[in-house]
Amino acid sequence: MRIEEGLHLVMSGGGGFDLTDAFDCNVFLVAADGGWLMFDAGAGRDPQSVFDVLDEDGIDPSTIRHLLLTHGHADHSGGAAALRERLGLTVHAGAATAAIVSQGDEEGISLGKAKRGGVYPPDYVYHACPVDSVWEPDEVRRFGDVAVQMILTPGHSHDHVSYLLTTPRRKMLVAGDALFHGGKVAIQDIADCDVGAICETVRKLAAIEFDTLLPGHHGFTLKDARRHADLALQCVNRMQIPPSII
């Protein structure tokens, strides 16, 4: 789904736009360095579906060169192995996510609990994926005319990061599950979800300048996106927890 020139949504499941498998998160492509950066990988239950979307959008899959992961939860990283194998992608992540994804650590992403709770079907299989490039906190890398900064944003999970992109058109926050439209967050009953860390992440994101919010689920925002961080911060400043999408 073309959002604008240089920005496409190519996966999105039941918690979004129903483009692909119901368990997929929002997966965005951003044009950079003559090709595309992909952010997150979906759950991997239907790898072909993304290629159908790419074909509809007129995007040559071979021009997708880099995959950047926000965290290890299955709906965000489960599709990484199939995409890396088919496209020869360079997979990027923070150190904690890299450890989880490369080892296929199902307990590290609470997948067993999610299956027992009916969040994922019992036959869902998570495929480990090598991570080729591990980023340092706050590291900035350039992909042609796009600068990407990795920001630690724990809370929803201990390994969560977000990416701040500066492009010729926009300053975009790829927020994963750290921040959503309307100032919401994502709180789950899993071992590494930390409400205090979520609130600290809200404070951090509210202090950053960005005009576009690209979250892992639900709607995205192209203009004046800082207002969503400000809404979450209003709750935090009142010693309240921002509302959860879950």
Image: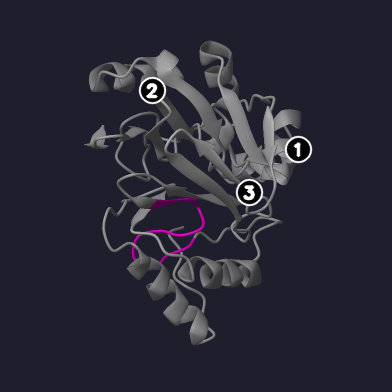
Q: Is residue 45 left or right of residue 181?
A: right
Residue situated in front as seen by the camera: 231 or 38: 38
- CA gap, disc 3 to disc 2? 29 Å
Residue situated in front as seen by the camera: 93 or 170: 170
Residue to which mark 1 is pinned: 99
- CA gap, disc 1 to disc 2? 26 Å
| Span highlighted in magenta in the image | 172-185
Q: Amino acid at mark 1?
A: Ala
Question: Hey, which quadrant is residue 123 in on the image?
Answer: top right
Residue 133 at x, y percent in the picture: 67, 32
Residue 181 at x, y percent in the picture: 35, 60
- CA gap, disc 3 to disc 1? 18 Å
Residue 192's tag is none
Residue situated in front as seen by the camera: 65 or 97: 65
Q: Amino acid at mark 3?
A: Glu
Residue to which mark 2 is pinned: 50
